[in-house]
């Protein structure tokens, strides 16, 4: 969060009338006294800057003796322009508040906010809003490209951020939890359900592990002989899950196949009711199948008993509510227009068994899936993705205008990458132990840099150390590099700072020097080995 001041301001224009809604509608705030050429507040007004936060409030007392002071927060917003020293254009961030704070009094027209529960309330709200706005920007980039890589030095929050993006992509930004604990609980649920998958690239990872390969198995039926079977890797598995249709879509597909099956005059399609009575299924176009019970002569029922296809779908939709496979007629209690439900259930049973229609699920929507690849630049991209690298491109995905499918080498089935699969990679920009990232990957991924954020560091000692290290890196960095690419991230300066300084930060700086990322002199190197951050003096 950037450095800025918070100001409690009144909601009138020099009189007693509450005009907060007018300020909100006009997207501004001004001091009513100054507007009437009364400069009593000029000194404090001139301290208010663009980017500061205005909290529009009213003050009052309550209680039997009116001895309880209270401040009501009506709205807050950020200043984006100054029209005059007393008039400001404001983006009202939350303009529908009516939050009361007992024991807090801001009675003046303009006061700088003190460190109290009201200030903390607003800061937390703004932090959540800004966090979601930041994540929204990343999600928009990912939605546009389908593939993105978060880049940055150690500790800037690359892996940390992937969880936020994954939850936002799967659930929508509006449903993103407001705190980290709830967000990680949801993230774990998505991982457990298979909607999000996580892997780490390394130099020994290959196509057989990532896409599909032959894996040895012990065949118990052949006296323990080893057999080889084609096993899908993490990438193929999540692609298969992302391509799964809703249960109702699966039923629709099965019904279309049954229509084709019944249209073959040489083929007689037979099914059974739940009581075991066999019947034949006919189809002659239209919205119904026709049933001929095997124990009935067809001429006695004409062309057959019509079973409406929509009735079959309704039976399927209600299969979890009614015990239709034992008592098919129970559905007529609520749906009397469903005729011959025994035959409808028989057809449904046939479709489930022959075409593998799954059990009905009502919570399905067009889900997004996310594959997170940590340390993506450490893998041999050609060795891992093989011929599938082209399929990652947005317009080559399944259902897109330039859709491409390829035959996999081990299983002959055609394979494509679904458009509802999003790939998020992370890349450590300080890692020079490997070459530059594969250009084939670079062309197919959007890159989003993450930087060390000093404003997130609250401990004064840690903040001072961060500034000293930043100055050291800026003055001793290899001229071919960018300081942001190796500036140690803020997470090292937050929790367990003393431990991190001794066992992670200082060893990392020495490693930078050893690898040529920094060019330290002997004194600076000696200071680090003595667990001291060297001072860089201004010339």
Image: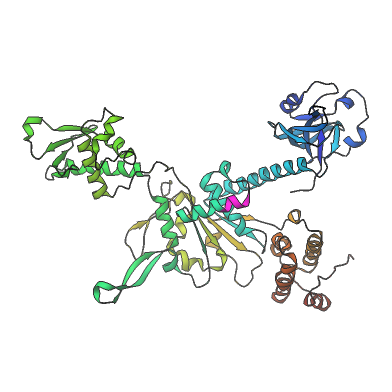
* Quadrant housing the C terminus: bottom right
- Residue 218, quarter of picture: bottom left
Q: How is the image coloured?
A: rainbow
Task: Answer left or right for 429 relative to 238.
Answer: right
Predominant SS along the magenta part: helix
Task: Give above or below for 53 relative to 377.
Answer: above
| Percent position of residue 453, x then y | 73, 56
Task: Answer left or right for 358 relative to 349.
Answer: right
Going 71% across and 72% down the picture, which residue do you hit?
503
| Percent position of residue 536, x then y | 85, 68
- What range is drawn magenta here? 178-184
| Percent position of residue 46, x then y | 89, 37
- Closer to the camera, 122 or 322? 322
- Residue 247, quarter of picture: top left
Task: Give above or below for 8 relative to 400.
Answer: above
Residue 186 magenta-drawn?
no
- Residue 528, quarter of picture: bottom right
Q: Is residue 181 something one can see in this rendering? A: yes
- Closer to the camera, 494 or 446? 494
Q: Is residue 422 something one can see in this rendering? A: no
Task: Give above or below for 191 relative to 522.
Answer: above
| Percent position of residue 226, x then y | 30, 76
Going 58% across and 50% down the picture, which residue do you hit?
183
Question: How many labels sit on residues?
Answer: 0
Farthest residue toward the front?
64
- Closer to the camera, 538 or 324? 324
Going 42% across and 55% down the picture, which residue do you hit?
239
């Amino acid at each position: 969060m950037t450095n800025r001041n918070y100001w409690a301001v009144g909601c009138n224009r020099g009189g007693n009338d509450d005009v907060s809604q007018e300020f909100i509608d006009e997207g501004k705030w001004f001091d009513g006294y100054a507007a009437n050429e009364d400069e009593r507040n000029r000194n404090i007004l001139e301290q208010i800057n663009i980017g500061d936060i205005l909290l529009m409030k009213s003050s009052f007392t309550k209680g039997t003796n009116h001895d309880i002071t209270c401040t009501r927060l009506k709205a807050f917003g950020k200043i984006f322009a100054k029209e005059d020293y007393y008039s400001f254009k404001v983006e009202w961030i939350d303009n529908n508040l009516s939050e009361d704070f007992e024991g807090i009094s801001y009675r003046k027209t303009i006061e700088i906010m003190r460190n109290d529960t009201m200030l903390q309330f607003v800061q937390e709200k703004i932090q959540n809003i800004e966090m979601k706005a930041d994540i929204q920007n990343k999600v928009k980039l990912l939605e546009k490209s389908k593939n993105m890589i978060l880049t940055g030095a150690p500790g800037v929050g690359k892996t940390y951020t992937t969880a936020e993006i994954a939850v936002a992509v799967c659930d929508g930004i509006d449903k993103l939890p407001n705190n980290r604990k709830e967000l990680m609980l949801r993230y774990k649920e998505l991982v457990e359900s298979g909607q999000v998958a996580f892997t780490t690239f390394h130099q020994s990872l290959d196509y057989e592990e990532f896409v599909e390969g032959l894996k040895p198995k012990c065949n118990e039926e052949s006296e323990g002989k080893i057999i080889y079977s084609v096993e899908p890797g993490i990438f193929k598995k999540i692609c298969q899950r992302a391509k799964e249709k809703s249960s109702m879509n699966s039923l629709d597909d099965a019904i279309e196949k049954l229509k084709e099956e019944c249209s073959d005059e040489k083929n007689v399609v037979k099914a059974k009711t739940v009581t075991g009575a066999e019947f034949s299924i006919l189809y002659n176009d239209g919205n119904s199948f026709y049933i001929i019970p095997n124990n009935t002569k067809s001429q006695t029922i004409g062309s057959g008993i019509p079973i409406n296809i929509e009735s079959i779908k309704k039976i399927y939709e209600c299969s979890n509510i009614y015990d239709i496979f034992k008592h098919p007629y129970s559905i007529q209690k609520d749906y009397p227009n469903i005729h011959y439900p025994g035959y409808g259930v028989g057809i449904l049973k046939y479709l489930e068994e022959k075409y593998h229609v799954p059990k009905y699920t009502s919570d399905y929507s067009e889900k997004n899936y996310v594959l997170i690849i940590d340390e993506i630049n450490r893998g041999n991209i050609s060795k891992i993705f093989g011929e599938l690298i082209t399929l990652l491109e947005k317009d080559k995905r399944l259902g897109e205008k330039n859709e491409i499918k390829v035959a996999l080498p081990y299983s002959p089935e055609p394979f494509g990458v679904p458009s509802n699969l999003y790939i998020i990679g992370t890349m450590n920009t300080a890692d020079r132990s490997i070459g530059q990232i594969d250009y084939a990957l670079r062309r197919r991924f959007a890159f989003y840099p993450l930087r060390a954020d000093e404003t997130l560091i609250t401990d004064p000692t840690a903040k001072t150390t961060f500034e000293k290290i930043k100055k050291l890196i800026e003055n001793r960095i290899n001229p071919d590099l960018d300081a942001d690419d190796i500036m140690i991230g803020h997470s090292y300066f937050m929790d367990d700072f003393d431990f991190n300084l001794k066992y992670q930060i200082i060893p990392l700086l020495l490693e930078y020097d050893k690898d040529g990322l920094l060019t330290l002199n002997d004194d600076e190197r000696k200071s680090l080995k003595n667990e001291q951050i060297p001072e860089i003096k201004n010339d």
